[in-house]
Amino acid sequence: MSPDMELLPRLTARLIAAAVRLSGAGQASSMPGKAVNVLFPGYLADHARRLDGFVVVTGTNGKTTTANMAARALADAGRDIVHNNEGANLLSGIATAFARRPLARFALLEIDEAIVPAALARLGTPRVVVLTNLFRDQLDRYGEVDRLAAGWREAFRHLAVRDETVLVANADDPIVTAVAQESGLPTLFFGVDVRDGRAEREVSDVTICPRCATMLEYTSRWLSQLGDYRCPACEFARPPRDLEARALRTVDGHAEAEVAGLAAGELRLRVPGLYNVYNALAALALTERLGVPTQAALGSFAAYQPVFGRWSLVRRGDTAVQVNLVKNPAGMNQTLRALGDVPGDKALVFVLNDNIADGRDISWIWDVDMEELLPAADLIVAGGTRKHEMALRLSYAGVADETLTTADSVASALELAARRGARRVYLLPTYTALKEVRGALTGWEVVRQ
Amino acid sequence: MAVGAAPSDAAAGATIIEAVHLFPTTMNTYGDRGNVAALTRRAALRGLTVRWHAVELGDEPPARCNLVFMGGGQDRVQHAAAADLARLRPWLEAVIADGGVVFAVCAGLQLLGRRYVAADGSELPGLGLVDLETLAARPGEWRLIGNVVADVPGLAAPDRGDAADGETAAGAHLLVGFENHGGRTFLGGEARPLGRVRLGFGNNGRDGGEGVNAGRLIATYLHGPVLPKNAWLTDHLLALALAHAGGGALAPLAHPREDAAQREAVQVAERDAARRSRGRRFARLLRRGPA
């Protein structure tokens, strides 16, 4: 398809985007691309071929924030890129992004971990693939973690033949490490150095050696299967880090760390949490690879404002509401731990939906370390399509009946919090619940952090 | 604080239920901690202590045991678990023969049966503690995934001595939860299912059976947190274990939050069924055009 032959797909995308926005159905970040992919099946591959290049960010957690941080650094460095920046990470979201920014010559693509093989089959050979982590997520949609890893292996075998791709991989995650090492592709490993050993009890899918199935040994373990591991039976062990974050700390609710290795400097973020340090490290490895000067990238990360639903903050009167998407045990544990670091009275609102995009199986809430990590709160509200299961989980974790209540909507949960005089509310919705949260917070003032 | 523990522990001298969690690190795919939490919690609210012993691959089990729980696992670890279970077979048999209770979920159910036949025809021998076998999904067969509602006939009352003595106790129950399995399990002539599916697939998607109830051995495909929202099953297992521990009858205990979660699970199962039937009608319409 020549550039002007792309006119029809682009017009289609624009028309549908306008219709979706008019109907108030949302951000129009995937519907336009869905239609384009059906009507013009060659569009994605043709457009990708005309790019100067593209890079991919994939994994269970941290895709959106990692890609957004890297996009911000690339934009600040004056690069013209196309980026599916609203977390619409299926083929439809990629097509939507291409149609919106048809002239950009370089693409930064967040890709759902389950469709990596299908996406690369259409898009061709990426310059860089960032592998954030592989956690247990929405098992009823994706099947088992082992099967996801097998899909990655297969996709990377094809890339190895061309030998034009570099991997950026999380050294602290044994399954990501095993996939990267087996791929034969050159790999930049990143990792963090955590020595306080606050290991979580949360179960993980990767406790046995990916090579020989012996139980892995950890000297320290800090988040699900992430840690300092080695196999007692074979050679497999956490590889040396090309890029490492050290001396992690939370200052005034913001994460800070020192970065060492192929890039060195001070990392300062406007968001809390160990996993945001991981996101920034992965983004830094990517921007280094793409030639952005280290200090410029760190400056961009320090100015990075979270997108809605990723620790975003809104205010009305003297009430502040912070929203963070939660969708699996690893993410929820990290969120609760970050909340535990924030001083002061607070109300928590969990909104647990079980629509298809959330995963219909909500078993995962029982794998969250609620007993250990749930911060003290004046009020805890359970909402969403599975509010009663959430309330039961919280009750079994020891939340007293007078603190715990259920609400039929996000709006009524906020009213309950207001009636109790809560000044600081933390809203933790699953994926589809985020839309209702956005609606309920319309008119609130967005606070820059 | 342990998962599900009540604020105050049981008074000294109260009966302790000795419970074994088999292979908690390797067999843990789906929220199995919820089952541990439910047993611990509903015992604690009655002043009873459940003392959990984690038995990992290769570990020696404790001599005294009133209750055994085994969860689900990925294919890769199931082989290791099957090999080690063969070692533990005499112990498990002794627990059941002595009056203890075994509760297994998903892969645990498959491993307790006679055999597992893989897609290539190769066989993984099971424990043979219950008369059932499992066939891997054949090419073209889907995994059986979704919300389940099943009707369970009255369970044997443990205080009447013989728990295997079928439906002597009145009181049917609803069993709700989520299933996700490729294997199709078929019960032999001697085994009875735990329930009959109203919504969902159950053991094999054909005969309507869900799980297996062999009195002191109960297993289900409903994984992870099946016990929290089926308080009657939690209490049934606790009653059997308590009687075996010499603690007498289990005191009654209300379960309003558990029942609310159960009603909600029924609603979502009905919602999914309605969606599927709308989808099928739409697909028919597309194929044939409006009638």
Image: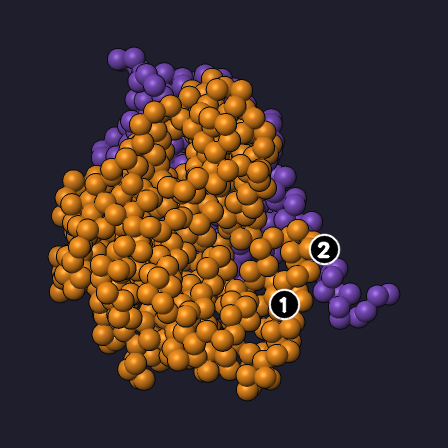
Instruction: Tell me, by letter, which chain the rendering colours purple.
Output: B
Residue occupying the point 29% across, 41% down: A254
- Give percent across and percent down for residue B109: 43, 48
Direction from residue B57 to residue A112 in the image, left or right:
right
Direction from residue A204 to residue A124 in the image, left or right:
right
Q: Name the one closer to the observer, A130 or B39.
A: A130
On the rendered image, what quadrant is the C terminus of chain A found in?
Answer: top left
Q: Amino acid at mark 1?
A: Arg
Q: Amino acid at mark 2?
A: Arg
Q: Residues within 10 Å of mark 1 (few under 14, many from 20)?
A: some
Q: Is residue A302 visible?
A: yes
Instruction: Tell me, by letter, which chain the rendering colours orange.
Output: A
Residue occupying the point 56% across, 26% down: A415
Q: Label 2 belongs to which residue?
A: B278
Q: Secondary structure at mark 2?
A: helix
Q: Chain of mark 2?
A: B
Q: Looking at the image, is A304 positioned above or below residue A159?
A: above
